[in-house]
Image: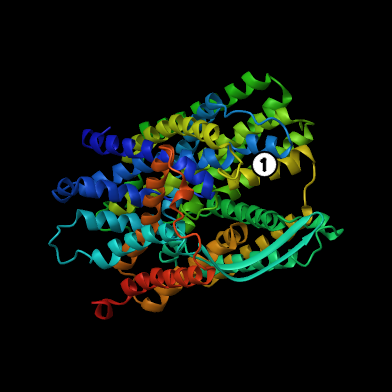
Amino acid sequence: MNRRDIFPMIFGLIVSTVLAATLVIAGLKAGITPGVSPLVILFAWAAFSGRIARGEGSRFLNIAQVAGSAGMAVTAGVIFTAPLVQILHKNLGLEVPPVDVVTLIIMSIAGSLIGFGFVGLATRKFLTDPTLPAPEARACETMIETAALDPHSARRPRLGRSLVAGLAASFLAPLIAYIGLATEHVVIWKRSITGESGSRDFTFDLPFTPIYIGIGGLLTLATALLVFLGSFFRLAGDFFLTTIEPASAAAAAWPANSMRWVGGGAMTVAVAYSLIKFVSTRRASVHVNSGTGTTAGIDMTLEIDPAKRKMLIGSIVVGFVILIGWLFATDGLTGFSFAMGGTIFVMCMLMVTLGAILSLQVGSSASPVSGTIFVTTLVLCLVAVGLGRQSIDDVYVLTALIVAACVAVCAANDSSQDYKTMQLCGVRVQDGFPAQVIGLIAGSIVVPLALYVAHEAYTLGSPDLPAPQGEMFATLTEGLLINSAVPWTPIMVGACLGVVAVMIEMVGDRNGKVLPAMALAVGIYLPAYLGTGILIGAAFRWAAERGSRQRSESILAAAGLITGAAALDLILGIAIIGGFELDSLLLFKDIPEEIKIVVATSGIAVLGLILYRNSLPSEEGS
C-alpha cells in the first residue's frame, strides 16, 4: 500500500461508514439508493481544497472516492434483499422475526469479497469496452479534474452556473416536494379498474427527480431513447393490464405485477446476450485522458501485478469458503446445500460481471441491480423447488444467499464506476483495491446493525418503512417457492422483447451504432417514470449540443443534479436516526394539487434548462 494513500483512505472510510449507516432508512423508504461517488468527491474537495490544489489532488480524490462509496454498495445489497424474510412472514400472517444481524454480517462480508475479486480480475475487459459510456464515472472524472486545477486557471470551468447550480437545484427539488409545495410526479394520465379481487392501475407521469434527469444529461440520446422505449413498453403493458377485470380468468395469467415479470424476462435475455458478448469479444485498449501512461498501446492504468491478482483470487476463494461454510453449518452436508452452493457460485460469477457492465452502461444510480437479483432469485427458487425444499424455513437459507449475491453485484456496480474514474484520471486501478475492500468490510458490519435498528424502530414492510425492493422479492419468493405459481405468460412476452432488444443491438453493431439491448431491458424492468426522466435530461442536453463536443460544464451540471439529492438524503438519514419524523416536513398540507403540479412542472423545466445552458457550444454559452 502506498503511504500517501493512507490519509485519503481513512477519510473515505469515515465517509463510507456514515453514508452506509445513515442512508439505510432513506433507502428502505424510497426503494432506491443514489450513486454517492460524486458526493464523496465533493466532500473531499470541500474539506481539503488547499491540499488538493497543491498537487496530487487527482490521486487523493480518486482514493477517497473508492473508499468513501464502497459502504453504500453494501447498503444497497442488504436493504434490497434482506427485508424479504420479514415482509414474507407479514404477508403470510406469521409472526415477523427480528433481523438476523450475525447472518447478515457474514453474508455481506462473503458477498463483498466475491464481488471485489471478480470485478478486479475482469477490470481490463470491461474498462476497455467502447460500448460502455460510463456516465457517472465521467462526471466524477470531470469533478476531480476541475478540483485539481489551479483556481485561477483559464481552463477552469464556470462552477457557479454548472456544478453549484446543479447541486442547489437537486437539493431543493426533493425538499420542495417533502414540504408539500410540489408533487413528486406530474401525472399526465391515470386509469384504474377495481374489482372484488383487487385493482389495476396505469399512470403516465413526469418525475420531478433531479437524479434521473442528471443521468440523462450524461447519456447519449440513443441510449436514453432505448431506455425510454423500454419504458413505453412498460407503460403499454400497464395500460393493457387495466383492461383486464381483476376477477376474470385472464387475470390469473396476467397478475397485477405482470410488467415486473415481463421486465425480468427481457432482462434475462439481455443479460445472457451481454455476458456472451462480453466473454467472447476481445476489446482493443482505448485512449484515455492525458494523465494516463501507455506502453506499446497498452493502458498501464489497467495492469495488475501478479501479487495483486493472487489477492483477488484469494478474495473470491475466502468469500465462497465463508458462504459455503455458513450453508453447511446451517443445513448440513445435504444435497440441497451442495446444489445451492454450486448454483450461487455460478450466479455470482455471472451477475457480478453484469453488475459492472450495467453500472458503466447507465450509471450506478439507475443501474437495475434488482433485475440481476431477480434472475438470481428465480434460479435459486427453481432449484429449491426441484429439490422439494419449499417451506418457510427454506426461505431463511435462500434469503441469506440472495443477500450475498446482491452485495456482490452492488460491489461490482460501485467499484466498476470508481475504477473507470481512476482509469480516466490516469491513476493505476490496482491502487484502489485496498480502499475498496476496506470500505466494503466496514459497510458489511455497520449496515446490518443499522437495518436491525430500523426494523426495531419502524418494522420492515410497514407503511413507515415499506422496503419496495424487499416487497418485490417477497412476492417473487412466495409465488415461486411457497405457492409454485409462476406467471409464465408475462415472462415469455418479456423474453420475446429481450430478443427484439438484442436484434436492435446487433443491427446497431453492424452499422457502427451503439444501441445496447440492456438499455431497452432496463426501461422495461424499472418504473416507467425513470425512463421518462432520463429522456428529459438527454433531450435538453442534445437540444443544446446538436453534434457539438460535450463540454465540461454540462458534465458538472449533471453531476450536481445527481449529487445534491444524495446530500439531502444523507442529511435526512442522519436526522431520522436522531428521531426526526419525515412527516413533520410537510408544512403545506392544504395547498391545492393544481399548484403543486405547476411548481413541479416548472421545477422539471428548471432542471432541464440548467443542463441546456451548460451544454451550449462555448461561443453561445459564454
* Residue 609 location, quadrant: bottom left
Name the residue at the right extreme.
249
Q: Residue at x 73, y 55 (%)?
A: 491
Give the quadrant of residue 543.
Answer: bottom left
Instruction: Using a 10 Å C-alpha cutoff, classify the residue at mark 1 as few (fewer than 14 neighbours), some (14 to 19) or many (20 or more).
Output: many
Q: Quadrant of the C terminus?
A: bottom left
Q: Quadrant of residue 13?
A: top left
Answer above or below: position of 138 versus 375.
below
Query: Left or right: where does residue 82 sit relative to residue 432?
Result: right
Identify the residue under disc 1.
Answer: 474
Q: Label 1's element?
A: helix
From the top left corner, tell me how far across and down residue 224 is, in percent. 50, 67
Picture layout, residue 47 above or below residue 201 = above
Q: Tell me where residue 335 appears, x and y as whole percent.
A: 73, 25
Q: Residue furthest front?
A: 590
| Residue shown at the point (33%, 64%) measured from the top left | 557
* Residue 576, placed above or below residue 250: above
Residue 292 can be seen in this image: yes
Give the x, y percent position of residue 481.
Answer: 75, 38
Along the line of sight, the residue nearer the viewer: 148 or 471: 471
Q: Quadrant of the N terminus?
A: top left
Image location (x, y in percent) of residue 578? 40, 37
Q: How many marks?
A: 1
Taking the spot 64% from the left edge, 32% from the top edge, the residue there is 342
- Asked if residue 513 shows in the view, the reply is no
Rendering colour mode: rainbow
Give the amino acid type for the residue marked by disc 1 in the picture: Ala
